[in-house]
Amino acid sequence: MDEAEMNELREYARRWQRLEPLLEEQREEDVRQSNTASNIAAFARLWTEALRHEPPAPTSGLVEQQRIFMKLGQS
């Protein structure tokens, strides 16, 4: 990496350092303005809809994983 690239990276890092307080302030304001109960209800509806279209598998897959590991161990 040449000197110009290093200077560019340093400037990039300085910009993020200057922006960090502004971004944190914005994040805190977003949290204050959010409606947690409404967000939870929306996510619950999304989860229910997702389960309707893609029900969970009947098993966790661990038995299948162990079967594959056993085959790999025999190779």
Image (spheres, rainbow, N blue to C red):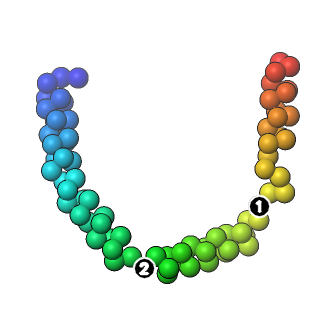
Whole-percent x, y for residue 5 in the image: 18, 30
Residue drawn at the location 56% of the way across and 79% of the way down: 41
Whole-Å distance between the Cαs marked 1 and 2?
A: 29 Å
Does 54 appear above or below 64? below
Q: Which residue is mark 1?
A: 56
Please state, as top left, top right, bottom left or bottom right, where the N terminus lies in the image.
Answer: top left
Q: Using the image, determine if residue 35 lies above or below residue 27.
A: below
Residue 62, position as x, y percentages in the image = 79, 42
**Vertical side of 8 occupied by 3: above or below:** above
Q: Nearer the viewer, residue 44 or 75?
A: 44
Occupied quadrant, residue 6: top left
Q: Residues within 10 Å of mark 1 (few under 14, many from 20)?
A: few
- Please state, as top left, top right, bottom left or bottom right, where the C terminus lies in the image: top right
Q: Secondary structure at mark 2?
A: loop
Q: Nearer the viewer, residue 6 or 28?
A: 28
Name the residue at 23% across, 64% down.
25
What residue sits 25% from the left and 59% below the top?
Answer: 23
Q: Quadrant of residue 10?
A: top left
Amino acid type at mark 2: Asn
Q: Residue at x 62, y 77 (%)?
A: 45
Helix, strand or loop for disc 1: loop
Q: Does residue 60 appear to the left or right of 14 in the view shown?
A: right
Residue 34 numbered tag: none
- Nearer to us of marks 1 and 2 is 2
Across and down, in percent, residue 7 comes to 13, 32
Question: Which numbered disc covers residue 35?
Answer: 2
Residue kind at label 1, given as amino acid type: Pro
The spot of residue 34 in percent (x, y) is 39, 76
